[in-house]
Amino acid sequence: MATWLELPENTGFGLDNLPYGVFSRGGGPKRVGVAIGDGVLDLFAAAEQAGEAFANLLGDGTLNPLLAAGRPVWRQVRAWVTEWLTDPAHRELVGSHLVPLDGVQLHLPFEVADYVDFYSSEHHAINAGQIFRGADDELMPNWKHLPIGYHGRAGTVVVSGTEVTRPSGQRKPRNETVPTFGPSRSLDIEAEVGFVVGVPSEQGKPVGTDAFADHVFGVCLVNDWSARDIQAWEYQPLGPFLGKSFATSISPWIVPLDALEHARVASPPQDPEPLPYLRHDENWGLDLAMEVRLNGHLVSSPPFATQYWTAAQQLAHLTVNGASLRTGDLYASGTVSGPERDQRGSFLELGWGGREPFDLPDGTQRTFLLDGDEVSISATAPGPGGSRIGFGEVRGRVLPAC
Ligand code: CA
């Protein structure tokens, strides 16, 4: 697609992407924007000046009203932005609302309603099972029958760049008889993909796999910070709690589902065949190539296409009991790990529960995160004509415990 814009070569934020975010400049008001190349279009200002009716969905400094508007409006806005960025007739108006990305502050792009985290990578589940429970106890008997998940803490979802304070809590190593309290000694990351719900659903009415694209607006990256020692002591029998709830970071740009048509692939074969409500005819696997960096060093490249359960199946499962969806719901894929050692999406796996420290190019080793460490997770996906759809990154630095 031709444009009058000068875009950096191989940008992940090309015309086929057009991800949405919320930005501000110099302490000014929050604005809904669309990333294009190394700039951001002030979508609210441009739409308002052009007299577009959908401008009234964009004036609150959050994506929620646009998320709630539904797929026909999402498509209309996307087509409008595409036209304005390609037709030279709009050059002057659009140009006056383009801001360099390096001069803006990015904010949490939507108000998070409910937050759910899944556990849908078979490689991760097997690795974690072996590390936590031993080699004889790999997958739980339910794992291949339903996407395992838990409800997390929506209020502690933060945008990329937010610093994360090392949590304190109870931990009891296996070789000690009583728990002690203190800063986590095994702070970890989980590289995940997040799905943002736009259109709500009615309580009591499940959302089928075929309605996935009617409800889900787009996709972001997630770092599910995890305190493994707190988690290991508290998680049985009711699941993750304080080992997870202190912080979850997301990337600032929400890539619309419509930008990911070329990334759709068949998910791995499922055996046994899932129950009817979990089946789908469409391919909802997504071929995202993820990268995890610690202090700038690439430590892992998790392949999202290897996920056992798809986002459409996860949505069907989380509503099958009649639980309703709200605009701004976020659900995450679970740690993405591929079959290879350098495809593991957590330090738990990369360092095998602390027993096998891994090397960094700077000569240091890690099992878990040290104070001051900075983690970034990025991803790209195939776009049309050999282009790449960029997700930007979710980044965060560890601060010492209070
Ligand atoms: Ca997780």
Image (tube, rainbow, N blue to C red):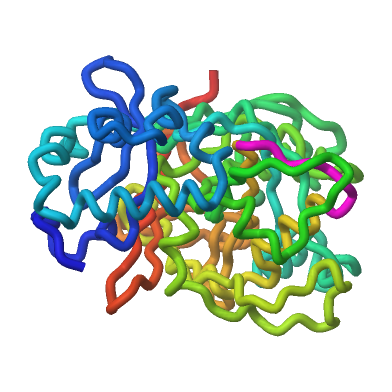
Q: Quadrant of residue 105?
A: top left
On-image quarter of the N terminus: bottom left
Residue at image position (48%, 50%) is 220
Q: Which residues are magenta?
A: 320-327
| Towards the viewer: 225 or 212 | 212
Q: Quadrant of residue 345?
A: bottom right
Residue 233 point in image, percent of width and height: 80, 40
Residue 141 point in image, percent of width and height: 90, 69
Q: Quadrant of residue 69?
A: top right
Q: Does residue 188 show up?
A: no
Residue at image position (68%, 72%) is 308
Q: Is residue 318 magenta?
A: no
On-image quarter of the C terminus: top right
**Left or right placement of residue 301 versus residue 228 in this view:** left
Residue at image position (53%, 33%) is 64
**Left or right placement of residue 148 versus residue 196 in this view:** right
